[in-house]
Every structure is written in structure tokens, then in C-alpha cells.
């Protein structure tokens, strides 16, 4: 029915209302007991922390998608069967019995999994712009700030005789060679 795929992807599993935590715990226990860590990698319930409307000092976690659990897994007949037959699961999200893979962008927007970019420069380093509209136009800039996920960087450079701060994609910036 399902093709073996060596790459793990995120899938959305529908659960009975209020069973999200129970399904996640059951899946994690099944993975541990049956040694299926090579097929089912992670189980997540997207939540956000909000201030309790009745008590401003109390913060509560609220499920972003009630009745849904996200599972990162290698999809094959065995993993599909394990997840589909877990108590509290009504099925995968997708047409018929075909689960739909979440795109990397969807996963990142949900805040479930973020990829951090490794950079060879840091704040204060002298860099040059190697891509984008300012490629070869800015040959000497200083890194002022790097975003938390490392995907964007703010640099300070001289443009038309004025010091200007510019936000760039981090892949368009390269450390100056000494």
C-alpha cells in the first residue's frame, strides 16, 4: 500500500477530541517498547503559551490545533499501521488512507522544527555581500546583528557616503579574508 521512504517527514494525525496528549504518550511508549525509533522519530503537539484570562499572572498552554498530533516518521506499511492503530487515533490527514507530507515551510511556520543555519562569521566581523541586489556593490560591511534562526543578518555599510544598516539573507554574506 505505502512506499518505503528512507527520509523521515512530518505527518498530521487526527485524534479524538481531547486525546492529543494520550495519543502522543501512547505512540512514544509503542516506539520505545517495539524499538521503532528508526521509523518514528518524534511526536509533537503544537501549543502556545497564553495568559490566563481569569488570572493575569498565570500562563497556560493552549493547543494550536485541537484533535491533531504531528508525527515525524519514515512512512511505510509498518509505521503507518502502528500510528493508525494507536488508541485515540482516527486517521492521518490526507485523501483516503494516503497521508499528506507537510512541507518544510509548513513545519517551520508551525514552530515544530526549526533549522538553524551555521555561519562562519559573527557580530562585529567584517563581511562582504556576495548575493542579492547589493552583490559586489558592498565590499566592506560590519555584522551588527544575526537573527535567532541565523537566516537573516543586519550589516552596517557605507552607501553613497552614509552609514546604513541593511538586512540581508545570511547566505548572501561572506566573512572578509584577513
Image (spheres, rainbow, N blue to C red):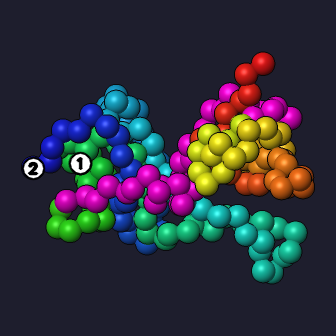
Residue 61 in the image, given as x and y percentages of width and height? 67, 64
Question: In this picture, is 89 found above or below 65?
Answer: above
Q: Is 75 contained in the magenta span?
A: no
Contact (Cβ within 8 Å) of mark 2 with mark 1: yes
Q: Start and end of the magenta stretch?
A: 98-127
Q: Nearer the viewer, mark 2 or mark 1?
A: 2
- Judged from this view, the residue extending furthest toward the left is 1
Residue at x 89%, y 53% (from the top left corner): 161
Q: In the picture, residue 6 is in which quadrant?
A: top left
Task: List the residue tagged with mark 2.
Answer: 1
- Judged from this view, the residue extending furthest toward the front is 160
- Determine crowd level at label 2: few under 14, some 14-19, many 20+ residues with C-alpha closer than 10 A: few
Question: In this picture, is 94 found above or below 53?
Answer: above
Residue 80: image tag? 1
Element carrying mark 1: helix
Element carrying mark 2: loop
Residue at x 66%, y 51% (from the top left corner): 134
Amino acid at each position: 500500500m505505502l512506499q518505503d521512504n528512507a527520509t523521515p517527514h512530518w505527518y498530521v494525525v487526527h485524534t479524538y477530541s481531547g486525546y492529543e496528549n494520550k495519543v502522543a504518550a501512547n505512540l512514544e511508549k509503542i516506539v520505545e517498547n517495539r524499538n521503532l525509533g528508526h521509523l518514528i522519530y518524534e511526536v509533537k503537539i503544537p501549543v502556545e503559551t497564553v495568559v490566563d484570562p481569569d488570572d493575569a499572572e498565570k500562563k497556560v498552554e493552549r493547543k494550536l490545533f485541537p484533535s491533531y498530533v504531528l508525527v515525524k516518521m519514515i512512512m511505510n506499511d509498518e509505521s503507518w499501521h502502528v500510528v493508525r492503530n494507536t488508541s485515540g487515533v482516527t486517521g492521518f490527514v490526507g485523501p483516503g488512507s494516503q497521508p499528506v507530507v507537510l512541507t518544510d515551510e509548513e513545519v517551520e511556520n508551525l514552530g515544530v522544527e526549526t533549522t538553524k543555519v551555521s555561519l562562519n562569521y559573527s557580530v562585529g566581523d567584517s563581511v562582504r555581500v556576495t548575493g542579492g541586489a547589493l552583490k559586489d556593490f558592498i565590499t566592506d560591511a560590519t555584522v551588527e546583528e544575526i537573527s535567532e534562526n541565523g537566516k537573516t543578518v543586519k550589516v552596517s555599510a557605507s552607501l553613497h557616503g552614509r552609514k546604513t544598516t541593511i538586512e540581508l539573507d545570511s547566505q548572501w554574506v561572506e566573512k572578509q579574508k584577513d
